[in-house]
Image (cartoon, rainbow, N blue to C red):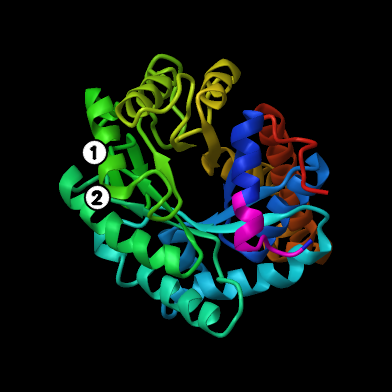
Amino acid sequence: MPIATPEVYNEMLDRAKAGQFAYPAINVTSSQTLHAALRGFAEAESDGIVQISTGGAEFLGGQHSKDMVTGAVALAEFAHIVAAKYDVTIALHTDHCPKDKLDGYVRPLIAVSEERVKAGRDPLFQSHMWDGSAETLADNLSIAQELLERARAARIVLEVEITPTGGEEDGVSHEINDSLYTTVEDAIRTAEALGLGEKGRYLLAASFGNVHGVYKPGNVVLRPELLKELNEGVAAKYGQPAGSKPFDFVFHGGSGSSEEEIATALDNGVVKMNIDTDTQYAFTRPVADHMFRNYDGVLKVDGEVGDKKTYDPRTWGKLAEASMAARVVSACGHLRSAGTRIK
């Protein structure tokens, strides 16, 4: 099946919320990591989300120009062709975009989709993320309102991060402290500014102690039960029935989380979980193993000629793809999305 249409993407999110599962959102930086993600989803019989961060887009744009929009558009167009060969449905998303990169990344990409929609086509990406966590909540939500209006017109879902995620990703960093927990008041202010779907659909990256990267046990204190409090607070404010889940939550900093923490997050409305650090390692680990095991083959040691079959990028690249795909399969199992693909 090809890349999800706007209608199918909304169906995917609805199905995840109703079924209390989430889609792994896999960061990719090349055609090879894209294929690894697609392969993992196909082997798990799970639909999924593939995403490109600003740093990933810059890398994809080539080190000569480092153009983020060129890199993102090029891989998205490639994905629209190759994803059709996999028996799953994939949504394309752009990850973390802070304020100083909006004009060089998200806004131009929305413009690309606006032109496509005007011409009667589907948007290039199905969703974009605005990361305003470094701004005041008032400024964050003001920009989110502008972006949500444009996204809705372009048939795109917006993702917003309203409070900080700890650690560092693509130059955006926050300390690991008590500010990493969204309050009910923050959630209510978000609903007041962005609505609950009537102004356009959005995904909410709320903070419950999330940290990018992987840390040793005890360094990070996740409180996924906080998501229930946020939903209950907003539901009560808007007169919704008990047990309602007004928000479509995103789990950031998911690498290294325990299965129990993930399960609690799913039960409380998470429909998307970002996975990057773990898949980066899964991709690189077999490459390192290959290089160490074939030292005198991948290098021309002591005037020898090496072994072309061992330094051929296809040789170690296939190992990397298989390892990363296996990590995606594992993620689908943890997030309960395995076997849920749209038939």
Give the vertical position of 118 relative to 178 (above or below): below
Q: Can the viewer see residue 80 in this picture? A: yes
- Residue at the spot of label 1: 189
Q: Nearer the viewer, residue 232 or 62?
A: 232
Residue 7 coordinates in the image, percent (x, y) = 63, 58
Instruction: Give the SS element for disc 2.
Output: helix
Mark drawn on residue 313 = none
Give the vertical position of 280 relative to 9 (above or below): above
| Residue kind at label 2, given as amino acid type | Leu
Q: What range of the chain is rendered magenta?
A: 2-10
Q: Are marks 2 and 1 in contact (CB under 8 Å)?
A: yes
Which picture quadrant has residue 228? top left
Which picture quadrant has residue 330? top right
Give the vertical position of 313 relative to 267 (above or below): below
Whether residue 5 is in magenta: the answer is yes
Identify the mark nearer the N-term, 2 or 1.
2
Residue at 41% over, 28% down: 240
Residue at 38% over, 32% down: 211
- Residue at the spot of label 2: 141
Residue 265 coordinates in the image, percent (x, y) = 51, 24
Please indicate whether residue 46 sits to the left or right of residue 231 in the image: right
Q: Which dot, 2 or 1, sits closer to the camera?
A: 1
Please indicate whether residue 271 sits to the left or right of residue 217 in the image: right
Q: Find the residue positioned furthest to the bottom.
A: 119
Instruction: Give the SS element for disc 1.
Output: helix
Spatial CA span between label 2 and label 1: 9 Å
| Residue kind at label 1, given as amino acid type | Arg
Residue 17 coordinates in the image, percent (x, y) = 59, 35
Q: Can the viewer see residue 296 in this picture? A: no
Whether residue 73 is in magenta: the answer is no
The N terminus sits in image quarter = bottom right
